[in-house]
Amino acid sequence: CAGGGLFGPPKVKEEPIVPAAALYQGALDDMDRQYYQTAIQKLEKLERQHPRDPLAEQGKLMIVYANYRIGKFDEAILAADRYLALYPSGKEVPYVLWLKGTAYFAQIKDITRDQQLSRDAIDTYQILINNYPKSEHAIDAKEKLLVAYDQLAGKEMSVGRYYLGNGQYTAAINRFREVVEKWQTSTHIEEALYRLTEGYLLLGLTTEATSAAAVLGHNYPSSEWYRRAFELLGKQGLAPALNSGSWLAAHRS
Amino acid sequence: CTSSTSLISKRTQGYEIPDSALQQIRPGQSQQLVTLVLGSPQSTNTFGDRTAWYYVETKVNQTSFGLTMVQERTVLAVYFDRNKKVVDRAIYTLDDGKVINIETRRTPSFGEDATFIDAILSSF
Amino acid sequence: AGLPVLGVVTAQAQEQLVASVLFEGNRRFPDAQLLGMVDISTSGIFSQQRLAADIESIRRAYDREGFLSVSVTARTEQTADGRVRVIFTVNEGERAGIAAINFTGNNAIGANNLKGTMLTKESGILSWLLRDDTYDEQKMAVDRERIRLYYANRGYPDAQVNSVAEYDASRNAYFINVTVNEGQRYNFGNVGIETSIDGLNTDVLRGTVRTGKGANYSVADLQKSIEDMAYEATAQGYSFADVRARLDRDVATGTFNVTYLVDEGARIYVERINITGNVKTRDFVIRRELEFAEGDPFNRSMVVRGRNNINALGYFSKVDVSTAPGSAPDKIVLNVNVEETSTGEYGATAGYSTADGILGELSLTERNFLGRGQYLRAAIGASQSGRTFDFSFTEPRFMGTKISAGIDVYHRIYDETSTNFYGYDATGGQLRFGVPLTSALSSTLFAGYERKTIRDNKTYDHDNDPTTPEIPLPGQTSSLVSHGEEFNKAFVGYTLTWNGVDDIKKPTEGIYATFSQQYNGWDHNLLRTEARARYFMPLIQDSGIVASVRGQAGVINSLDGGAVHAIEAFSPGSQLIRGFEGRGLGPRLTSGEYLGTTMYAGISGEIEFPIPGLPENYGLSGAVWADAAWIGSDNLPGMGSGSFDAGSNDEPWRTSIGASLIWASPFGPLRGDFAHVLNKSTEDRTQVFQFTISTLL
């Protein structure tokens, strides 16, 4: 608008060219003093002023690391993508992949919310594990992958429990079946089998209920959920009995 | 706004099983025929080489302030043998449903469930 | 040797590093913003193609803002160390505005209304701020469609609209000429409902028809009737009910006969409902707004109703519902994607109300607390005559039903001022339950407790000599209550609300009414009953002029034969009749102390109209009104040691007329009322101007 010229935003001043090594070293010193924000500014200047300098690759990696350290996850992910695009076969790719995956992982929401961040973390860790299985980052990625998978199973459970409590038993059963079929290694598998027992009982399908409880008992005999299933069936005068080769039996590990 | 101009509205939850269809399901029929008559199953189950298809129809009355009263429920289970032919058919109704109280404890899960304070701060 | 080897080498030599990127002559966009649009600065490598691309992206940015005559050039200078300095010079020129939008062929609907529906606006005093006067071909295409739809909703289904824009270089502005071919005017003829579903009760369905015989042809009403009718049919237990409308045109009489066909749609079931985008809101808060679950029949009207319910939550800026094929031909997957918006507000408002003078409030409101859809509000208010502390919490879906449960707790301090004879501290709280009954009728049940402690000991330094004791304000000790007296009130009650208006924010048609009864016990034993109703009616078709008639009445009966204590009496103010000071209306004691009343009634007629000439988006409108109010004085509240001043109610009927200016501000509609009182009781105190928040009732 008209007034902009008078007291408008400051004009971009001409930046003095600082040698690449000085910028990079300055950024490292800043990071030692926990001044990550100023370090990032120096590294970005390095990237801009010396795009062809051999230090640029290391500088880009440091930008990813610095953003990750101060919790600016979206910026860290963007910087990681820039690094991966420019140096697809760089020696630091596993570490950058790990930083990117963990940037997603750190933002994972609880299971009552959208789990898109878990899926992003899974995809990134999957690339890391498939392409660099021997790298030390892959080991940690595998653990975090399990947790992220567990979140997806947790989301199904939370929706299933909502439908169960709301009286829509068939919708609930289908959600718990999804967990039993797709996420057998998740920590929710025991509860999923228990909830199937509940759902089938509520519908009156007693054979299906006893089968579900039987599989739960067979695979997880000492589980708290099996004890509850046993009691639940006991109250109805039933006992977990494996119904002649139920599909659930196919899960005998 | 809520349901309808009247106080009570009738709803069907789950599958609408036409009465005529119930009689048409007889042992020996193929899965294609059952799908033709009843539609694809709402929920499925397998027992070793046998599979089971379930169609659940629940008639409810809902008041405008959200109280749902179940009027009747029909659970139709169709069992198929190894070569996908109908072996058995079972119908369960509302009174077959067991009355249980649903377990409230849950498996703990990861993810920051925002505590009171940062829920307030994060919302601004 | 001059030949380049395979042409590759030359490209390499040209690549130079950038020393810096500078901008000259730019006023509309600050340098930082332009830096963002330019690729050279981020990549640090200079090349001719990048330079050309950057010039084009700057030019396009200016073009979008309406600077059509902008010219962007760039020059490069070599710096000492062999790098290149890039300087972009921008010659913005003047913003091209829109001098005038002219309409031809619009004999049924005025140009002002048509301009109101368009996104493109003529240049006006606020254009530099709103920037809505830039000419853009896509926006113009949208505007043509909006005008066509405006006509189709007002009796002209065949209207055609096209527009031509001429750029006048001398005035650097556009002239837009919109030509409308309205076609024949149509009303709705007779309306029939046919169904192939046996057992479907079609008379109930008739209630949802908005395309009554003789009404203007309207696409929107037709669409709404179809949706509501399908929804009504499903509510009778026919899950697959689907409605289509067959229109047969009768050119001679200029009518469309409508036949609604209610049939069984395809038997498709919802296989799965995926809810995405809810990073803060919990899944069940959205899922519970859909009145169907996974595995239930798929019914279009229920999906539309669900989407509207999710939208109505007010937590999302965007709600997209899309379908995808399921695992079987008769299965469908529903994808609900939401985009959350901020639902928390720190409020710091300052205001002025004639009753309390300058007032301020610090408030913290969260409409989607912890993502559970709960409402939380805490506010601290202060005004010249007191301080208030309020806290309130609401759970919209109590115990899984559609009943909302809430709690309010407050502590309010009212100081003794020159107008009221005593001040008091009120501490209390209440529980409330909101029970929706039908789509128009809803009810609220409430119960609570309140303790009032009277403060009537104000003294003042009469001889401004601090050593001498102060004396009470002359004639200010109340004869109704005494200092330190406590009143405990336990109350329980209900309110019925009928909301039949078309749009709650800006009603133009329909009735809005409330009826409430409240029993006050403990130190009192009385029943307080109040009823209010307001009927809205558009006067001249689409002129935006709305007439409304409001009736209200209230009575307090004491249940144990005793008198109603003055502290619980009504003190009717500007909400009953305009033109009177706060507590300046109705029975008073001879000492001048305000007594209040146990019975009142009032009727008021108002005509609200948009101010001609002012564009709609300023939100200003005017109103003329006439109020009449009756205040009974046969069973007055208990007068304690005072005696009734007959002059304060010798004329029970008060009437006043006046005009108001209404501004639809972000805090709600603010009103400035200019009132002239026609007749009143001798002791009533009038005032000409009043400043209030206008309420619906």
Image: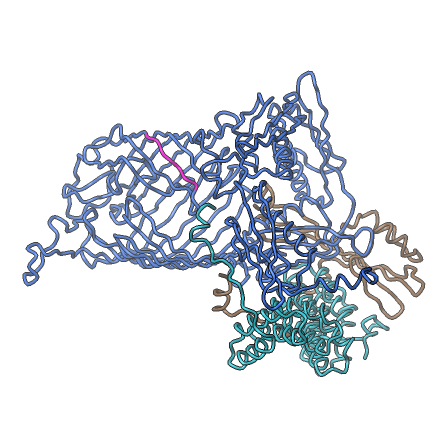
Residue C451: x %, y % from top left: 30, 58
* Magenta-drawn stretch, dominant element (helix, strand or loop): strand
Residue C466 lies in quadrant? bottom left
For chain C, what colour was chosen? blue
Q: Is residue B101 visible?
A: no
Find chain B in the image and tell me its colour: brown
Task: Determine if residue B46 is in view.
Answer: yes
Which residue is nearer to you in this view: C164 or C30? C30
User: Vertically, is C304 above or below C657?
Assistant: below
Q: Position of residue C333 (x, y in %)?
A: 74, 54
Q: Is residue A125 above or below residue C521?
A: below
Q: Give the answer, above or below, for where C374 lies relative to C667.
A: below
Image: magenta residue range: C658-664
In this picture, residue C650 sits left or right of residue C352:
left
Quarter placement of the N terminus of chain C: bottom right
Task: Say which quarter of the image contains residue C3.
Answer: bottom right
